[in-house]
């Protein structure tokens, strides 16, 4: 086994060696026999200027490399180091392609030895890691990384990380290593060669398993830990009603405890709600300590009354935080133990029987190979078998559909049922005091008459301002092109390797013939006809939307309302196509079902493989039937739902979606939820408009006379921490064209950015305006020294964009939609928040239009009852991005003058904490910004 590894890192002038980018720093760390034996690093003269961005990223400038050797002078040393070694790097393709180019330029043939990529290895061996960036892995593994983006520091950290990865690989069970070996042949690196060598050295090692792992049906799995009670739990524990008693408990369990009077207020409000079986709305400002504010009293009620309490959050991140941070803290504080379980939908859990079967399948692409390897390692670690623990690629998420837990694939073998992670989680939930879930599963349970969650009648809904929108999705239907096409391609035609071929193989394996069954070619033709009609249907939807488009806003992304009362030619074409789709689906469904019925009749026993394929086809039929039901509901059956088409005119067919949702879910929630539950606490930092809960009460269907209401303000001193400025030399947003407005705000953004030195979050209400502003700032060249990060333009998720924003001193982040809330950037990383326009939803947005029509019909005022309150809540969420701790300070800039010029502007200002407001010309305001920051 080769015991020599050379870990390499480079800094370069750019990303494209073929287009003349050059190396500016080379570093290598040599590892032999598990020890670092040599280090080499050198700056390199690239013989071209270093771009400003690279200088800011690496700290390396033209002066530093002026007298450094050119690459050809250090090439002999590099070739000497690489002799007989594995080449190791973090993202091998980048470093190797640059090095090859430079070696060839220096007269060498290049490097042709084996390579290992620590990104690829980390993805396999740390399958649950949030990120595979070197700096993030260094933090995770407690590695000292003092100078990121300098080759010597990066190479050192990569070498230390590589040694950790080698140790982890060597300590995996032998059975897992043997399963990884054949899969590793499809990787980008030479891990297969290394695994072969490793298995040869371990050939005499007996597979001595650690106490935490067991082998089941050929899979190495983590044993379920037996949790022991650390505290006795005497029957009735009195709730600490006074301040002193609460302080005593919290002091004992919390390091650096600070008394939060408003958190105590919230605890008492929640306790009173559940004790007296009421429904309550609690607006708790930023910094109150909301999670502990409801968990602490909920724990006492659950324990003393032996009643499970459901805690529902909006996001997975929130669920994880409650389980991993708040519950351990709660168990430290309380005089008794609380059992909490995180429960998710069935498809979030792995089906081990199905995974073992698909593990044997070949012809996999890179993503599937990597995902299989990730899961093999993960199974030695996971106690939950739950998908959200894994960091899967998009291809990995598609693969998950093959191995997810599903009622159609419920195992008949008892031994597999004992390792059914979903059944295990349900069993645990039935014994839990607190059941943590999300709004989606809560609503799914409501929709399915309580068949998913254990029986409960007390619930806390955190981030409750999202409940109405999630409910509308759950009580509605949606159809999108990609999902529909993927469903049909899963079954496929004879030309594709899908379920149709597997179905026909089973039919052919039966010697008897059944003349009543359709000929295989007829079924094949049915799939072709249905696929064609589905394509036509989505083309007609896109065509309908484009013809109805209002060209004035220049938007690429359209939302166009669809009404069955519309008797236009385009509308009739859509309805007729939808009808044809339902007939074709029904024919195909019946044909496949007849075949399956006959197979089950003829075959006394199916092989495991055949059984799995039959189950997979039944699952396909269920989904086909759901598609037909959705089409009937949206186009054939009469309903009061609001219906609309969403389409991107640049690639219409691929991103066309049809939506149908109730205009109001108030009645559904009142009858199916609030009237059936004894105590519901709805909490969030943004529930009131102008100090009133009326808007939310109406939207959710709560009874205003029997709902308790609490406003618990933030403990932060906003008057001291925040200034709001409103430039009055900007044009009125409704009096000029979008391009004129963008030109004016781009100028102001440049001026403000220079005053704040970046550290700006700019919130837009529409992507088109964001993009035009971004393009204009880029073209101007005035902010070339700044890192501009824009949602929908810069690649990456919201979390990744936020993390990149925090990484650079002079950064500006442009965001829309999801950036108005849930983004947490404390401290000096964010010191200026810009709100480009008040976040009103366009009046022709289908759901808004329908809600306003309903209000108008009953003689109400749509603007004051719906449009304004919705915009105010959104504004409060955006405002809340700036101050996250008591030490933060910053500036809020509002470009939209309506906040002070319109009579409704006060409603926005009265809904946020009182702060000093200054309006004036931008030059005066810039001086205020500079002195304030």
Image (cartoon, rainbow, N blue to C red):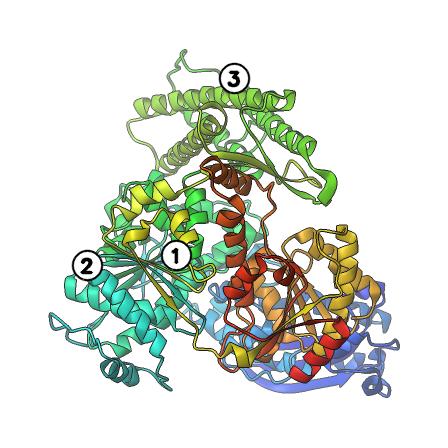
Q: Which mark is residue 881?
A: none
Give the residue furthest to the front.
Answer: 903
Q: Nearer the viewer, residue 154 or 32?
A: 154
Q: How many marks?
A: 3
Q: Which residue is mark 1?
A: 386
Give whichever of 572, 714 is nearer the camera. Answer: 714
Among numbered discs 3 and 1, the one appearing first in the sequence: 1
Q: Quadrant of the N terminus?
A: bottom right
Q: Please report whichever mark, 1 or 2, sits nearer to the chain's N-terminal start.
A: 2
Q: What residue do we see at 60% from left, 80% from top?
A: 828
Answer few, some or many: residues within 10 Å of disc 2's Cα (few below 14, many 20 plus, some between 14 and 19): some
Q: Which mark is residue 307?
A: 2
| Disc 3 and disc 2 in contact, CB within 8 angstroms | no
Residue 522 placed where, x, y %? 52, 17
Label 1: element kind:
loop
Q: Quadrant of residue 25?
A: bottom right
Left or right position of 364 against 353: right
Please identify the quarter of the rendering in which residue 43 is found.
bottom right
Are there few (<14), some (14-19), or many (20+) residues within 10 Å of tag 3? few
Q: Residue at x 45, y 21 (%)?
A: 586
Q: Earlier in the sequence, mark 3 or mark 2?
A: 2
Q: Residue at point 46% right, 19% down?
A: 587
* Residues at marks 1 and 2, CA–CA distance in whole angstroms: 26 Å
- Is label 3 or label 2 in front? 2
Which residue is depicted at the point 72% across and 73% down? 753
Q: Is residue 213 above or below residue 715?
A: above
- 575 to 298, vertically: above or below: above
Label annotation for residue 522: 3
């Amino acid at each position: 086994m080769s015991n020599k590894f050379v870990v390499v890192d480079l800094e370069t002038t750019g990303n494209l060696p073929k287009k003349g980018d050059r190396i500016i720093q080379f570093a290598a760390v040599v590892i032999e026999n598990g020890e670092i034996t040599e280090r080499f690093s050198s700056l390199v003269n690239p013989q071209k200027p270093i771009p400003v961005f690279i200088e800011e990223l690496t700290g390396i400038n033209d002066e530093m490399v002026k007298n450094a050797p050119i690459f050809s002078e250090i090439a002999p040393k590099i070739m000497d180091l690489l002799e007989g070694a594995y080449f190791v790097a973090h993202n091998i393709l980048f470093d190797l392609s640059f090095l090859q180019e430079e070696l060839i330029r220096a007269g060498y043939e290049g490097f042709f030895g084996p390579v290992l990529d620590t990104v690829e290895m980390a993805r396999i061996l740390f399958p649950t890691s949030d990120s595979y960036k070197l700096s993030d892995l260094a933090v995770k593994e407690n590695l000292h990384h003092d100078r990121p983006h300098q080759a010597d520091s990066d190479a050192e950290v990569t070498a230390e990380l590589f040694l950790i990865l080698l140790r982890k690989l060597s300590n995996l069970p032998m059975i897992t290593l043997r399963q990884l070996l054949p899969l590793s042949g499809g990787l980008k690196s030479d891990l297969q060669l290394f695994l072969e060598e490793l298995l040869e050295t371990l050939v005499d090692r007996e597979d001595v398993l650690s106490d935490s792992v067991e082998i089941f049906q050929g899979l190495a799995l983590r044993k379920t830990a037996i949790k022991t009670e650390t505290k006795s739990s005497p029957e009735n524990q009195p709730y600490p009603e006074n301040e002193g008693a609460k302080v005593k408990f919290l002091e004992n369990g919390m390091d650096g405890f600070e008394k939060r009077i408003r958190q105590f207020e919230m605890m008492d409000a929640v306790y009173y709600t559940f004790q007296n079986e009421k429904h309550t709305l609690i607006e708790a400002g930023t910094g109150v300590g909301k999670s502990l504010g409801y968990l602490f009293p909920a724990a006492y009620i659950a324990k003393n009354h032996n009643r499970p309490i459901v805690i529902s959050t909006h996001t997975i991140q929130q669920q994880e935080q409650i389980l991993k941070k708040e519950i351990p803290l709660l168990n430290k504080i309380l005089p008794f133990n609380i059992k909490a379980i995180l429960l998710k939908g069935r498809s979030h859990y792995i089906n081990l029987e199905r995974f073992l079967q698909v593990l044997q399948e070949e012809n996999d692409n890179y993503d599937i190979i990597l995902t299989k390897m990730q899961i093999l390692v993960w199974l030695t670690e996971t106690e939950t078998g739950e998908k959200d623990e894994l960091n899967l690629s998009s291809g990995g998420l598609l693969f998950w559909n093959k191995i997810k837990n599903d009622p159609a694939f419920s195992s008949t073998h008892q031994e597999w049922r004992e390792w059914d992670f979903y059944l295990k989680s349900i069993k645990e939930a039935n014994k839990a005091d607190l059941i943590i879930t999300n709004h989606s599963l809560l609503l799914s349970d409501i929709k399915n008459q309580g068949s998913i969650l254990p029986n409960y009648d007390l619930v806390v809904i955190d981030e409750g301002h999202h409940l109405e929108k999630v409910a509308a999705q759950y009580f509605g239907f949606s159809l999108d092109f990609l999902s529909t096409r993927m469903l049909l391609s899963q079954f496929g035609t004879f030309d594709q390797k899908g379920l149709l071929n597997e179905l026909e193989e089973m039919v052919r394996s039966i010697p008897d013939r059944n003349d009543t069954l359709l000929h295989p070619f007829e079924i094949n033709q049915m799939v072709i006809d249905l696929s064609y009609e589905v394509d036509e249907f989505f083309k007609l939807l896109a065509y309908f939307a484009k013809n109805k488009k209002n060209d004035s806003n220049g938007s690429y992304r359209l939302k166009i309302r669809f009404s069955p009362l519309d008797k236009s030619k385009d509308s009739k074409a859509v309805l007729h196509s939808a009808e044809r789709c339902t007939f074709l689906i029904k024919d195909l469904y019946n044909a496949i079902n007849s075949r399956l019925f006959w197979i089950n009749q003829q075959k006394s026993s199916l092989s495991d493989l055949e059984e799995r394929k039959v189950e997979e086809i039944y699952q396909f039929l269920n989904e086909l039937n759901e598609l037909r039901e959705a089409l009937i509901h949206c186009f054939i059956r009469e309903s009061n739902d609001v219906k609309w088409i969403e389409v991107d005119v640049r690639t219409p067919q691929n991103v066309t979606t049809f939506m149908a949702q109730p205009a109001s879910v108030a009645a559904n929630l009142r009858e199916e939820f609030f009237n059936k539950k004894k105590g519901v606490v709805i909490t969030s930092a943004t529930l009131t408009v102008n100090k009133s809960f009326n808007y939310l009460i109406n939207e959710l269907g709560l009874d205003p006379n029997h709902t308790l209401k609490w406003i618990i303000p933030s403990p932060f001193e906003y008057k001291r921490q925040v200034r709001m400025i409103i430039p009055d030399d900007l044009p009125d947003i409704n009096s000029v064209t979008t391009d004129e407005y963008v030109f004016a705000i781009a100028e102001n953004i440049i001026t403000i950015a220079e005053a704040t030195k970046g550290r700006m979050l700019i919130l837009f209400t529409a992507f088109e305006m964001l993009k035009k502003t971004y393009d204009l700032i880029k073209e101007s060249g005035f902010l070339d020294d700044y890192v501009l990060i824009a949602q929908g333009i810069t690649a990456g998720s919201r979390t990744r964009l936020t993390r990149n924003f925090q990484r650079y001193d002079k950064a500006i982040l442009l965001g829309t939609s999801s950036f108005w809330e849930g983004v947490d950037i404390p401290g000096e990383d964010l010191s200026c928040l810009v709100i480009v326009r008040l976040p009103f939803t366009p009046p022709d947005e289908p759901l808004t239009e329908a809600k306003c029509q309903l209000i108008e019909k009953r003689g109400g005022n749509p603007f004051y009852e719906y449009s304004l309150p919705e915009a105010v809540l959104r504004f409060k969420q955006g405002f809340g991005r700036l101050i996250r701790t008591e030490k933060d300070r910053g500036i809020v800039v509002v470009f939209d003058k309506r906040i002070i010029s319109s009579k409704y502007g006060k409603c926005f200002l009265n809904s946020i904490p009182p702060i000093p407001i200054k309006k004036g010309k931008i030059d005066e305001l810039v001086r205020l910004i500079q002195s304030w920051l």
